[in-house]
Amino acid sequence: MVAGLSCLALLATACAGNEPPEVDDSITQDIFLMDPDDGSNLRQITDRPGVDSSPAWSPDGTKIAFNTNRDGNFEIYVMDADGSNQTRLTNNRGDDFSPDWSHDGSKIAFNSDRDGNREIYVMDADGDDQIRLTNNEADDGLPDWSPDGAKIAYESDEAGNFEIMVMDADGSNKTNITDSSGSDGSPDWSPEGDQIAFISDRDGNFEIYRMTADGSDQLRLTNADGSDVFPAWSPEGDRIVFDSERDGNKEIYMIDSVNGENITRLTNNRGIDRFAAWSPRNAPGGPSIALYSERQVAGAQESN
Ligand SMILES: [Ca+2]
Ligand SMILES: [Ca+2]
Ligand SMILES: [Ca+2]
Ligand SMILES: [Ca+2]
């Protein structure tokens, strides 16, 4: 397994084998929603054995795609934004992970190791017509669709270390846009499409960065001990949420996207909080942040 992003910065459980998950009612490994301003109004929307993580909002805010190993290995599922109507979209022996919707909601990009190592795939939003867009020995993952639907950014170590790559949505014209000696990964396009947030360890440990979408003007936004990873933009583009272990265990934080200032912690508990995803503008259920949380059920009485 490649050191770094595939397992280390991702989620240890994503690297487990294909054994069906044990039922453990004492701990959640589920998707929650919370209010964006202060992390209040926490509510759990999945509740099944296994890990449900990597929530991704549909562009109209009515659905959430996610990955789960409830069937023995990771598959992509979709559900209504309140957790109802959970439907499996992939069904194979590899780990299918990290869904992201196209701008019109018609397609979902994701990564899968079904063909031997992580590659980027796209499929119709109902799971039909699964197409592989990368095909190499490298570790390719965490696809993120540009807001205009024309391009997909992703992380890959094809160049020898992890870089942010951008390709056309049909898999053509793959371009390394970070080109740094450190590990760069986890891209997320801004709502206007002019910026990409990402992570890099070029300065010693993983921090949140942003850059112009062509790779120019790479700017560090965080500076803390511990890994700051998985950036995601607010629908207005003024904030970025991410997860960090700077306070001892994984929590969700929010910063201003322009300069990284005004850091606000949105979760505060002894468990693991990761994979924040801000709902799109005008989501029918109101503004919220979806996240993965792994915490003792007794601790769920904590406010957030
Ligand atoms: Ca699978
Ligand atoms: Ca590959
Ligand atoms: Ca690099
Ligand atoms: Ca926590």
Image (cartoon, helix red, strand yellow):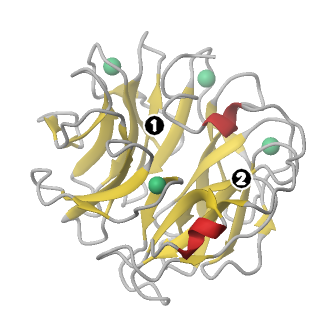
As drawn, 125 above or below 63: above
Given the image, on which type of amino acid does mark 2 rest? Val
Q: On the image, numbered disc 2 is attached to which residue?
A: 51
Question: Mark 2 and mark 1 in contact (Cβ < 8 Å)?
Answer: no
Q: Residue furthest front?
A: 298
Relative depth, front residue between 29 and 193 = 29
As drawn, 202 above or below 104: above
Q: Horizontal placement of 95 versus 167: left or right?
A: right
Q: Quadrant of residue 20?
A: top right
Q: Quadrant of the N terminus?
A: top right
Q: Nearer the viewer, mark 1 or mark 2?
A: 2
**Residue at x 20% of width, y 42% of height:** 222
Given the image, on which type of amino acid does mark 1 rest? Tyr
Q: Is residue 231 visible?
A: no
* Residue 204 place in picture, x, y as percent: 26, 20
Q: On the image, numbered disc 1 is attached to which residue?
A: 154
Label 2 element class:
loop
Q: Horizontal placement of 26 versus 110: left or right?
A: right
Q: Is residue 172 visible?
A: yes
**Residue at x 33% of width, y 46% of height:** 247
Dot 1 or dot 2, earlier in sequence: 2
Few, some or many C-alpha atoms within 10 Å of disc 2 (few <14, some 14-19, many ≥20)? Answer: many
